[in-house]
Amino acid sequence: MIVRLRALAGQWTAVVPVIAVVLLAFTWGRDLPAAMVALVTLVLAGSVLAAVHHAEVVAHRVGEPFGSLVLAIAVTIIEVALIVTLMADGGDKSSTLARDTVFAAVMITCNGIVGVCLLVASLRHGLAVFNAEGTGAALATVATLATLSLVFPTFTTSKPGPEFSTAQLTFAALASLVLYALFVTTQTVRHRDYFLPITRHGQVIDADDHADAPTARMAGISLGLLGLALVGVVGLAKGVSPTIESGVEAAGMPHSVVGVIIALLVLLPETIAALRSARRDRVQTSLNLALGSAMASIGLTIPAVALASLWLSGPLVLGLGPTEMVLLALTVVVSALTIVPGRATPLQGGVHLVVFAAYLELAVNP
């Protein structure tokens, strides 16, 4: 066992998370010169890859769908901490940050990650197959959470502007928590088989056939290193956020683009992990990661910002504009049509990627 631990410590995936946390401690709250920004970006990229590695180790130990759930929840919890921290530091300018980041997460996961995974799996294996029952339940939960939290504030009249009143925000926060908890219970306890990868003949794959599962001790070490890597990813992303904001302003792009870039950085671990699963023909695992991340992003962020609004002085704008609502509606319709057959061709993947490209284009040029 000692030899194994030393071998693990000698791997870069064990060293980089520690370096990231140390670098974070030295750079937190400071203005970074260009050379330091480059170093932080390099370590940030390494932390993303390390997080994916350790998440896969943990997933291999606990099995699906628990593995994808661990990564989705871990990333989202730290993402929420990042959003709240940036809102506390940014004043009125950050009043829409939670909305922009959560909506970006929904579009990235439901169109970007889903699209590229379906495209890769169908091109590599001829057809992407998955369980329509579990994936449909996940999509229904994401659509409900997104509508309750991001669409309704635009139409409510209790408070001027696209904002919830205190009572409405409390209801949205509690509803988000209840729905998310109910889905996790369904995914992991009552109907776990709905969220397991399946073969082309519809048979459930309940184990990894390619390698022995890691020991509990090794999985525990990877879980700890996963936490360090994710702290490094989100903390270093915050460190480079002033550079991102300056670049966005210099390019004349809307401030909402900052939320898009933050979401892209934070969701990199899920993106890479989902793509690897798609290449191995485990499309259901990819969809669990994508939709689970979207669901966790809404279900945990909205309650967190609702609680944070008690001490944040600025407004909390959650309502989407007309363009974003059309994109959200299109995403739900396209996703439903993709999921119903339980299989997808490159066409479906391409449709999702085109919707994602349209979102990016309209975010930069509204």
Image (cartoon, rainbow, N blue to C red):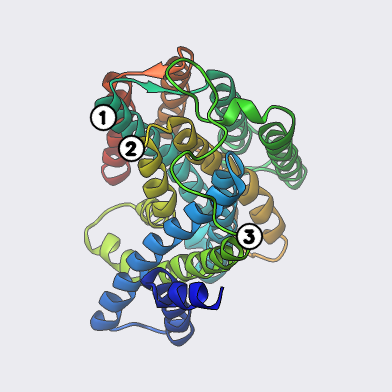
Residue 82: mark? none
Callout 3 secondary element: helix
Q: Residue at x 29, y 25 (%)?
A: 125
Q: Nearer the viewer, residue 79 or 189?
A: 189
Callout 1 secondary element: helix
Would you say the residues marked 1 and 2 are in contact, meaning their CB atoms lie under 8 Å apart? yes
Q: Amino acid at mark 1?
A: Arg
Q: Quadrant of residue 110?
A: top left
Mark 1 or 3: in front is: 3
User: Which of pointers 1 and 3 lies earlier in the amino acid sequence?
Assistant: 1
Percent position (x, y) of residue 238? 44, 69
Residue 279: mark? 2
Callout 2 secondary element: helix
Evaluate whether residue 97 shows in this view.
no
The residue that mark 3 highlights is 216
Q: Residue at x 49, y 77 (%)?
A: 3
Q: Nearer the viewer, residue 365 or 236?
A: 236
Per the model, the C-alpha gap separating discs 3 and 2 is: 27 Å
Per the model, the C-alpha gap separating discs 1 and 3 is: 33 Å
Q: Quadrant of residue 279?
A: top left
Residues packed near mark 2 inside 10 Å, few (<14), some (14 to 19) or many (20 plus): some
102 over 352 or under it: above or below: below
Q: Residue at x 43, y 26 (%)?
A: 331
Per the model, the C-alpha gap separating discs 1 and 2 is: 7 Å
Q: Amino acid at mark 3?
A: Ala
The residue that mark 1 highlights is 124
Q: Quadrant of residue 185?
A: top right
Would you say the residues marked 3 and 2 are in contact, meaning their CB atoms lie under 8 Å apart? no
